[in-house]
Image: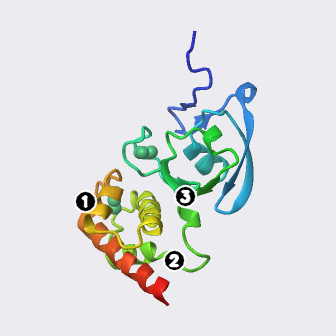
Amino acid sequence: MDSQPFETFRSSVSGRSETCPELSTVVGLTVNGKEQTVTTEPQRPLLDVLREDLQLIGTKYGCGEGACGACSVLLDGEVVRSCITPASAAAGRSVTTIEGIADGDRLHPVQEAFAEHGVLQCGFCAPGMVVAAAALLRGTPRPTKAQIVEALNGNLCRCGTYPALVAAVQEAANDVGEANQR
Ligand code: FES
Ligand code: FES
């Protein structure tokens, strides 16, 4: 007997997750400040709900097994890997994706610093990096280099932008610090 009756599987043709209507439930959650309701299998990855149901495609699918950080989002302010977070875990909670990091038209200091330091090469890792860095600065406004490295250590960049990445987060920290003193 199948030990994972709710298991979500991906179509080898489309790459989209498929859901079984009989096993679906209604999940209410807040995404980027907006209340949402989705009908989905409880164990379906939150990443698929965000990308496929809510069309928030800024969050990326990298490894699909929690190892690369490309799918990072905030769940009640904590960084989680949305590819291994079941949709049911987000019920009644607040999700922030890369689309919700900016303050309206004003980019987050991390986003501005990424652009200035040329962190964006192919850009695939950037949404997860930005989300993780923004979370770091909210909890630790003046991080040391070691703290930045530790916080972003699990976010992989195949383009090797790590030196620029660390410099960008350091600059963003300075900007956040100055803004807090005004
Ligand atoms: S896609 Fe989620 S950690 Fe790699
Ligand atoms: S910029 Fe290409 S993966 Fe990081």
Q: CA distance from mark 1 to mark 3?
A: 27 Å
Query: Which residue is found at the position 58% from the left and 44% from the top?
Result: 46
Q: Which mark is residue 14?
A: none
Query: Does 146 sit left or right of 31 as displayed?
Result: left
Report helix, strand or loop for mark 2.
Answer: loop
Which residue matches tag 3? 77
Cβ of mark 3 under 8 Å from ligand 1: the answer is no
At label 2, which amino acid type do we have?
A: Leu
Residue 70 in picture, x, y percent from top left: 42, 52
Q: Which circle's residue, 1 or 2, is located before the other in the chain?
A: 2
Q: Nearer the viewer, mark 2 or mark 3?
A: 3
Identify the residue shown where x is 47% and y is 50%: 71
Label 1 sits on residue? 160
Marks 1 and 3 in Cβ contact (< 8 Å):
no
Badge 1: how crowded within 10 Å, few (<14), some, or many (20+)? few
Q: Secondary structure at mark 1?
A: loop
- In front: 133, or 39? 133
Q: Residue 157's image quarter?
A: bottom left
Residue 99 rendering spot, x and y as whole percentages: 57, 64
**CA neighbours of label 3 inside 10 A, class few (<14), some (14 to 19), many (20+):** some
